[in-house]
């Protein structure tokens, strides 16, 4: 598996990944919102590839993880953990971060808790979790 920065050529594969996860992990999310995020130059995006296929993606804006998606056939195999830890390391390269937040849903909260995130707030079906960056995952 290789993790690399998102390229414009990855857009269609990321949109397919979005569609593959629609309903299982999120509902009522306008695909245009996700597409706009892929085109935002202020968002740090990484993709995971295996055998030339895009199998996952994650992105952050400032000190907040905005999206983490893994192909449904490859979930629970460590791809999400690897991508998240990679993203946290990359986020820290721009300077010290006391905390990083993650926007997620209740069913994904245990994943983030295993990486050291703790619930800070909830609004409807969206949770905001916080990780102190002086604590290793």
Image (tube, rainbow, N blue to C red):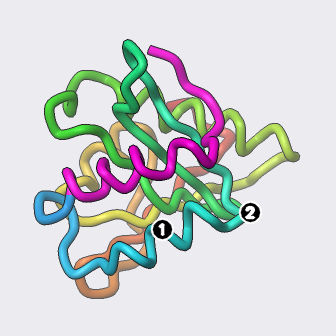
Against 133, residue 19 (above or below) is: below
Residue 38 as seen in the image, left or right of residue 104: right
Give the residue furthest to the bottom: 124
Find the distance from the CA under tag 2 to the CA under tag 1.
Answer: 12 Å
Residue 19 as seen in the image, left or right of residue 2: left
Q: Which mark is residue 9?
A: none
Q: Which of the two residues, 39 or 88, is positioned nearer the viewer here?
A: 39
Q: Which of the two residues, 44 or 86, is positioned nearer the viewer here?
A: 44
Please provide the residue range marked out in magenta: 1-21
Against 36, residue 117 (above or below) is: above
**Pointers 2 and 1 in contact (C-beta within 8 Å):** no
Residue, disc 2: 41
User: Could you tell me how many numbered marks the image carries?
Assistant: 2
Q: For residue 17: magenta?
A: yes
The 10 Å Cα crowd at callout 2, few under 14, some 14 to 19, many 20 or more, is few
Residue 110: x and y in percent read: 25, 48
Residue in the picture at 68% in, 40% down: 134
Residue 20: x and y in percent read: 19, 51
Residue, disc 1: 35
Residue 25: x and y in percent read: 19, 60
Element type where label 2 sits in the image: loop
Q: For residue 135: magenta?
A: no
Sequence-wise, the earlier of marks 2 and 1 is 1
């Amino acid at each position: 598996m290789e993790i690399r920065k998102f390229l414009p050529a990855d857009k269609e594969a990321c949109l397919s990944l979005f569609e593959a996860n629609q309903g299982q992990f999120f509902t009522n999310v306008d695909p245009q919102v996700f597409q706009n995020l892929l085109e935002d130059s202020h968002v740090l995006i990484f993709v995971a590839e295996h055998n030339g296929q895009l199998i996952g993606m994650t992105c952050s804006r400032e000190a907040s993880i905005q999206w983490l998606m893994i192909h449904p056939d490859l979930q629970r195999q460590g791809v999400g953990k690897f991508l998240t830890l990679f993203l946290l390391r990359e986020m820290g390269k721009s300077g010290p971060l006391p905390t990083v937040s993650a926007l997620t849903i209740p069913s994904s909260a245990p994943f983030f808790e295993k990486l050291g995130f703790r619930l800070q707030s909830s609004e409807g079906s969206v949770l905001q979790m916080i990780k102190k960056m002086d604590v290793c995952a």
